[in-house]
Image: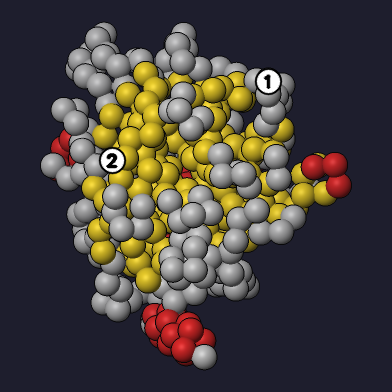
Amino acid sequence: MKRLVVTLALAVVLLVALAAPAGANTAVWHPCTVATFAAGDYGSFLEGMAADSHGILFGTLTTWGYVSEDGSVADSNIGEIWSVAPDGDKGLVATLDLSPNGMLLGIAVDRRDRVYVVSADFGEPQTVGSGVYRVDPDGSLVKVIALPAGSSPNGLAFRGDRAYITDSALGAVWSARVGDRVATPAAPWIQDALLAPGDPASDPTMMGLGANGIAFRGARVYVSVSDYGRIVCVPIHAGDTPGTPQVVCEVPELVTADGIAFDAPGGLWVTTNWGTTGGAPSGALYRLSPSGAVQQLADDPGWLNYPTMPVFGSTRATNHTLYIANGAYFDYEDGSAPDIQALPVGMPGLPLK
């Protein structure tokens, strides 16, 4: 009975927050810092985060190398995968030399608690290559999916033994079954104008980022499209074939939408890299109701610093906590550092399978 009372009390806290006016900031939220990461000599960026069944968080950190002003000299970027316990105890799990123009992005845990990370190589020619690596218990990285040059993989999620990877440049989602050999999909699982990026050359408000965050709810995959503040839903039919994409929501406040995560009642939590007030550090947090209504929960509140990914805790002790990865993309300029914030939100996340 006590557990039910506590759960109901936490739910009331969330409902009160969600009932606030759409433009309200978040005086009711009291996040705490779980872990902070070093910025290195030239800055670092925390992009992806996921939780395993034991409540351990895993994050992808790229530590930038030196780049000369004319771009003629570029030292290595180093990719790091970190584990973080709910009490803040963290450890370096694996590293990857991304020399000279690579970075680590999405990270996901499959139903057997194996960890996978996305690498993107923006070099011409590529050196590391774009694709997905499995992180083995000994810290070694094994490539399981290779993606072609010209792709820009970003978000990662699993459905069964298939990995789904958003492509921010091609406006697409790749899909491949993960096995003992390296999968090399010849074409995206789906590519659509609704997932495509804008063109910064013709519209300076665009960043050239299309499909970004990805999350499943039943036999539907949801994708955030950064440049347009758009959430797109793609039904999954028999044989793993995609249905017709549909726009769930598109509002200016969701421009720069990055990571997304579902709660158990069906609400979708969205982090945006930038808020709307012009405050610094910048970032915002939103929740889309199951009907698609948008509720602003935080808008440049001071504890968001280019947030990249929301993740619900996965254990009984943590499943009412939303963890937020602060990428701190501008840390080299403003002296900040990437971190992970814990936010009690009063309802559990949707269990991942």
Residue placed at 44% from the left, 77% from the top?
346
| Inter-mark Cα distance, 1 to 2 | 34 Å
Q: Secondary structure at mark 1?
A: loop
Q: Where is residue 351 shown, x and y percent of the image? A: 60, 61
Total marks placed: 2
Of the pair 254 and 302, the residue shown nearer to us: 302
* Figure check: 6 above or below 98: below
Q: Where is residue 199 shown, x and y percent of the image? A: 48, 34
Which residue in the structure is indicated by mark 2?
329
Which residue in the structure is indicated by mark 1?
181
Residue type indicated by callout 1 = Arg
Residue type indicated by callout 2 = Tyr
Q: Could one spot residue 150 in this view of the protein?
A: no
Q: Could one spot residue 175 in this view of the protein?
A: yes
Residue placed at 48% from the left, 39% from the top?
106
In the image, taking residue 109 as reference, residue 61 lies left or right, namely left
Q: Residue furthest left?
A: 335
Number of the label disc, if any, that sits on residue 280: none
Residue placed at 43% from the left, 28% from the top?
139
Question: Which image quarter: residue 37?
Answer: top left
In the image, taking residue 215 as reference, residue 300 lies left or right, namely left
Q: Where is residue 57 shown, x and y percent of the image? A: 42, 49
